Amino acid sequence: MARPAKREVAETCFELLNIEMVRLYHEKDDTSTARAALESIGFQVGHQLAERYSMDRPRFSEHLDVIKFICKEFWIELFKKPVDNLKTNRHREIFVLHDNKFRWLRHVSLAANTPQGSELVARYLVFPCGVVKGALASFGVPCEVTADILDTPGSCSFQVRIK
């Protein structure tokens, strides 16, 4: 059976949609409600994308294999490059994914080194946290995902804590 052609969205269109989605939810709702809504949308998107990108693969047997798939193949499909660095603490089931040039932050031009700027930039990382969480959930890996802004502009890390 022939696989259907890949359907893609222009990256700039998605980035602008993401910016407007974050702005709209934060204008409409309080911060915690907006964060929950954005993470939920990201979760659904991540779940569906992970199913699509892993359609022809056998199921993973270990959490580390799933994380490696996310860092390499899944990240490449979404961001056109693999994760820059993966740190693991397998005994505590914690994985930290570093991206030194996170593509979804390149149009966000706020000073992340100030408290107010850091909070505003963090809003744009809620949706991607949901995407990662949804992708992992599609492989049966329940987790909590948080993001931190790093010192270098456009760089961030995602901490995955397996439940």
Image (cartoon, helix red, strand yellow):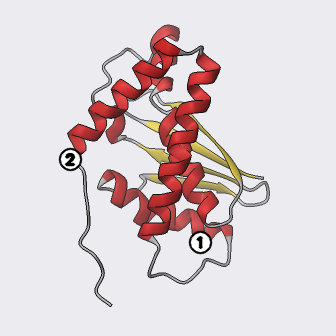
Q: Position of residue 51 (x, y in %)?
A: 49, 67
Q: Which residue is mark 1?
A: 65
Q: Left or right of 109: which side holds 35?
A: right
- Crowd class of label 2 (few under 14; some 14 to 19; many from 20; radius 10 Å): few
Where the N terminus falls, by quadrant? bottom left
Q: Residue at x 62, y 67 (%)?
A: 139
The answer to which of 115 and 57 lies nearer the viewer is 57
Q: Residue 82's quadrant in the figure?
A: bottom left
Badge 1 marks a residue whose secondary structure is helix
In front: mark 2 or mark 1?
2
Q: Which x, y percent locates residue 140? A: 68, 65
* Residue 159 in sight here: yes
Q: Residue at x 41, y 35 (%)?
A: 155
Check disc 2 and report its element: helix, strand or loop: loop
Quarter holding residue 34: top right
Mark 1 residue type: Asp
- The relative height of residue 19 versus residue 69 in the rendered view (above or below) is above
- N-terminal of the pair, mark 2 or mark 1, is 2
The residue carrying pointer 1 sits among few (fewer than 14), some (14 to 19) or many (20 or more) residues within 10 Å by Cα, namely few
* 99 versus 72 height, above or below: above
Q: Residue at x 79, y 59 (%)?
A: 91
Give percent across and percent down for residue 147: 56, 36
Compared with residue 67, is residue 146 higher up or lower down, i.e. above or below?
A: above
Residue 82 seen: no
Residue 10: give its label.
2
Q: Amino acid at mark 2?
A: Ala
Per the model, the C-alpha gap separating discs 2 and 1 is 30 Å
Residue drawn 50% across and 43% down?
42
Q: Position of residue 125 (x, y in %)?
A: 48, 33
